[in-house]
Image (cartoon, rainbow, N blue to C red):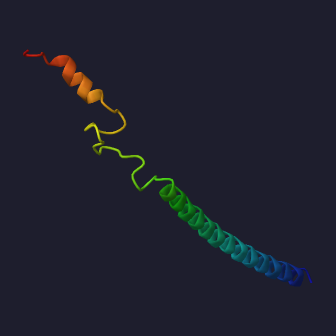
Amino acid sequence: MGAVVSCIESIFRTIGNVIMAIVTGIGSILTAIINGIVAFFGIIVSFLTCGYCGGRRRGTTMGTGTTGTRRGWGRRRHHATTTSTI
């Protein structure tokens, strides 16, 4: 009689483990989908706030001819080291 009860307990435990594996898999899939949606909206917001369309301008020349966000530091340094010939 004890062997039958042990066998039934083992069957229920196996069924429970299978159900938990299915629930864990579904949870992982939903987490991946939600993370993808969040990343997509992050890209859209960054694009709309000029994160990708030129708001950062790293290493590109601006109207003054300087690079980055240091606006004019390179030009001032060069003027300080050169002497006038007038």
Q: Residue shown at 35%/32% (left/top)?
A: 70
Determine which quarter of the picture holds residue 42: bottom right
Which residue reaches farthest left? 85
Taking the image as shown, residue 79 lies to the left or right of residue 5, namely left
Task: Give above or below for 34 relative to 60.
Answer: below
> Which quadrant is the N terminus positioned in?
bottom right
Q: Residue shown at 62%/72% (left/top)?
A: 29
Q: Residue shown at 78%/80% (left/top)?
A: 15
Task: Give above or below for 75 relative to 54.
Answer: above
Taking the image as shown, residue 41 lies to the left or right of residue 26, namely left
Towards the viewer: 64 or 39: 64
Towards the viewer: 3 or 66: 66
Taking the image as shown, residue 20 lies to the left or right of residue 8, namely left
Q: Exactly how many numbered labels are in the figure?
A: 0
Taking the image as shown, residue 41 lies to the left or right of residue 67, namely right
Residue 26: image location, x then y, percent: 68, 74
Residue 37: image location, x then y, percent: 59, 67
Q: Residue shown at 20%/24% (left/top)?
A: 78
Residue 81: image location, x then y, percent: 17, 18
Determine which quarter of the picture holds residue 77: top left
Which residue reaches farthest right? 1
Task: Give above or below for 68 relative to 16.
Answer: above
Determine which quarter of the picture holds residue 34: bottom right
> Which quadrant is the C terminus positioned in?
top left
Towards the viewer: 41 or 74: 74
Residue 71: image location, x then y, percent: 33, 33
